[in-house]
Amino acid sequence: MTLYLIGLGLWDEKDISVKGLAIAKKCKYVFLENYTSVLMGSTPEKISKLVGKKVEVLNREDVEQKKEYLKLAAKDDVALLIGGDPTVATTHIEILQEAKTKKVKTQIIHASSILSAVCESGLFAYSFGKSCSIPFWDDKFKPESFYDVITENLKNNAHTLVFLDLHPEAKKFLTINDALRVLLEIAAKRKKEINLNTIAVGFARLGSSDQVIKAGTISELLDFGFGAPMHILVIPGKMHFMEKEALGL
C-alpha cells in the first residue's frame, strides 16, 4: 500500500520514465493531477491508453481538499501522475507531509523538470535564486510580491525563474507578453529596477519539437510571438560571458 508520486516530464505522455510507467501500470488506482502543470502535448485519454487503465483527472479541489487518492493509498497502491517533477510544486510537498502524518507510505518517481530545462538556454543552474509566480490579475486581485523576489535576486546577481499562472479547466494560460506588461506596470510605480532595457528570456513549449527560447530586452520581447502555451519566463541577474554568448546577447 503506497502512494506513488510519478513525474510525467515536460511535454507529452512519452516523457514518463520506464520506471514510472511500470509502477503506474501495477497500481490499482491512477490519478492525473491536472492543475499545477499540464502536458500540452498529450491528453488524459492518451495517458490512459499508455498506462493501460482508466486515469482519473483531478482538479485543484480534488488534489488539495478531497484527497481521495490519499485515503485509497492506505489500503492499495495508488499512482498520482504529475506534470514535470513531483518535488517542484509546494502542493506535492504538502501531500508528502500529510501522508507521513497519516502513516501512508510514499515513493517519488522523478522526471524532467522545468527547473533544469530552462538551462538549455545556456543559463547556469547554480546562478538561480528564489523562484516566483505571476498570477492572473483582475480588478480585485493585483499582488506584487513576485516583483520583490525578482528585484532581490537582481541585487544578489541571481537569475529568477518566473512561473506563469494557468487555469487549465478554463483553458487560460498567462503569456510571457502579459507577464512582462505586469512587471512594467509595477515598475512604473516603484524604483525602476526593471524597465524596458531589462534582459529577459522567454520559453514556450519546452520539451516539444517546436519549443521557443528567446532572449532580449523586455522592449524586444513585449510583442514577440511565443505562440501556444505553456510559457515560462526568466529574468537573468549578472551573467557569465558564456551565458551571454549562449543567449546571443
Image (cartoon, grey):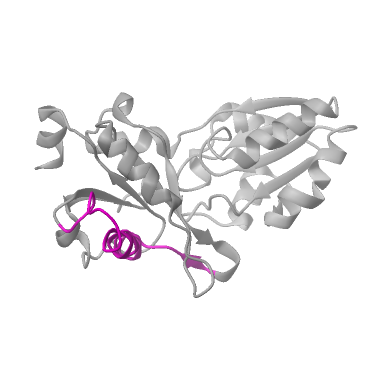
Residue 170: percent from the left, percent from the top? Answer: 57, 70
Residue 170 highlighted magenta (yes or no) = no
- Above or below, 37 against 85 in this view is below
Q: Quadrant of the N terminus?
A: top right
Residue at the image position 22 percent from the left and 64 percent from the top: 222
Closer to us: 155 or 132:
155
Determine whether, in the image, residue 13 is placed left or right of residue 197.
right
Res 151 quadrant in image: top left
Instruction: Kindly indicate the quadrant of the structure image that contains residue 175.
Output: bottom left
- Quarter the C terminus occupies: top left
Question: Where in the figure is residue 34, as x and y percent of width and height?
Answer: 61, 53
Please provide the residue range marked out in magenta. Answer: 171-196
Q: Residue at x 81, y 51 (%)?
A: 66
The residue nearer to you, when weighing 239 against 83, is 239
The reply to whether residue 54 is visible in this rendering is no
Could you tell me which residue is drawn at 64 percent across and 42 percent down? Answer: 91
Q: Residue at horizontal 22%, vertical 54%?
A: 192
Q: Does the magenta segment cover residue 189?
A: yes
- The location of residue 202, given as percent across then percent down, is 28, 51
Q: State whether residue 206 is above or below residue 227.
A: above
Question: Does residue 211 appear to the left or right of 241 in the view shown?
Answer: right
